[in-house]
Image: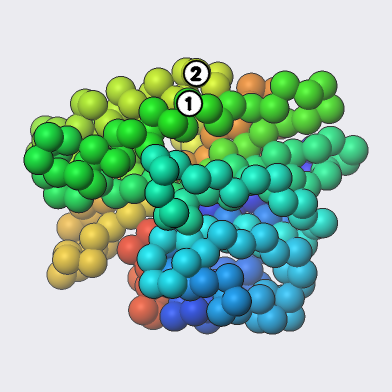
Amino acid sequence: MPLKIATWNINSVRLRMPLVQRFLEEHQPDVLCLQETKCPDDQFPSAAFRKLGYRHIQLNGQKGYHGVATVSRLPLELVEKRSFCNMEDCRHISTSVNVAGRNVVIHNFYVPAGGDEPDPEINPKFRHKLDFLREMHLVVPSQAADSSTILVGDLNIAPLETDVWSHKALLNIVSHTPVEIEGLKSVQARGGWVDLMRQHIPPSEKLFTWWSYRARDWDASDKGRRLDHIWSSPDLAPALERVEVLRDARGWDRPSDHVPVIAQFG
């Protein structure tokens, strides 16, 4: 099943459109899922994407915050824009593409970051994150015989000890706390999702997709976290050929603090 899909928290698509263009020209994924687009749908730079060959666009955006977008060189159908926690945040969109006669459903997520204090009793943002994870249990792979499912996005949780620069230092830091990890693993187990990044890159290896803007030299200090993920239904896992984390993109001009992740199926 030939398919190349990428996910990237772009941290403002209009501001970083030159970086998106560079990425698309150099890596040419079939489908690109963006998070934190930070613009309403009518201000999304659709014309620029179409000029690059990504004519099929599905959006769930809002002014200044959050927002997800899925763009594709393949015909792309909208499946659903799901709301979570009775809020109007634009944090999810699901689409579908047909690949070699198979329907592939793609869920594109931006999970709440959760604020700074990992206590739901005093931090509403952290409570929101935990509630969001509970509702994610409703998102499971398609059961249709001719369908497969992929889930991608900035899930804002680094679940493994090797997904953070220091397990000990970050154990009580939002994104790596036990309650968040338990919540994410529960979502994964409920849907039978396969963590494709860790299928391709052994869990014993350090793996990061995000480096803070606060670091004076992000590359030298290398205090990263794996916050971005690509999962699939079990039937797709054997077709995975490779996963690439484009670390160099963190050093591009005016970069996002996240880098693209690419999964190639064949």
The picture quadrant where one finds residue 144 is: top right
> Callout 1: helix, strand or loop?
helix
Relative to residue 249, is residue 225 drawn left or right?
A: left
User: How many discs mark residues in the rendered view?
Assistant: 2
Q: Which mark is residue 190?
A: 2
User: Mark 2 is on which residue type?
Assistant: Arg
Crowd tier of the residue under label 1, counting other residues whose Cα lies within 10 Å: few below 14, some 14–19, many 20 or above: some
From what the image shows, is residue 29 above or below residue 193? below
66 vs 52, nearest the viewer = 66
Tell me the distance, in whole angstroms, between the alpha carbons under discs 2 and 1.
Answer: 6 Å
Q: Mark 2–mark 1 contact, CB under 8 Å?
A: yes
Location of residue 137 with respect to 264 vertically, above or below: above
Residue at the image point whose x is 83% and y is 44% from the top: 98
- On screen, residue 163 above or below 125: above
Q: Is residue 177 left or right of residue 163?
A: left
The quadrant of the image that shows the C terminus is: top right
Q: x%, y% of residue 113?
A: 29, 49
Q: Quadrant of residue 80?
A: top right
Residue at the spot of label 1: 137
Q: Residues within 10 Å of mark 2 (few under 14, many from 20)?
A: some
Which quadrant is home to the N terminus?
top right
Q: Residue at x 60, y 32 (%)?
A: 232
**Furthest residue in direction front, as rendered:** 86
Query: Whole-percent x and y of residue 76?
Result: 77, 54
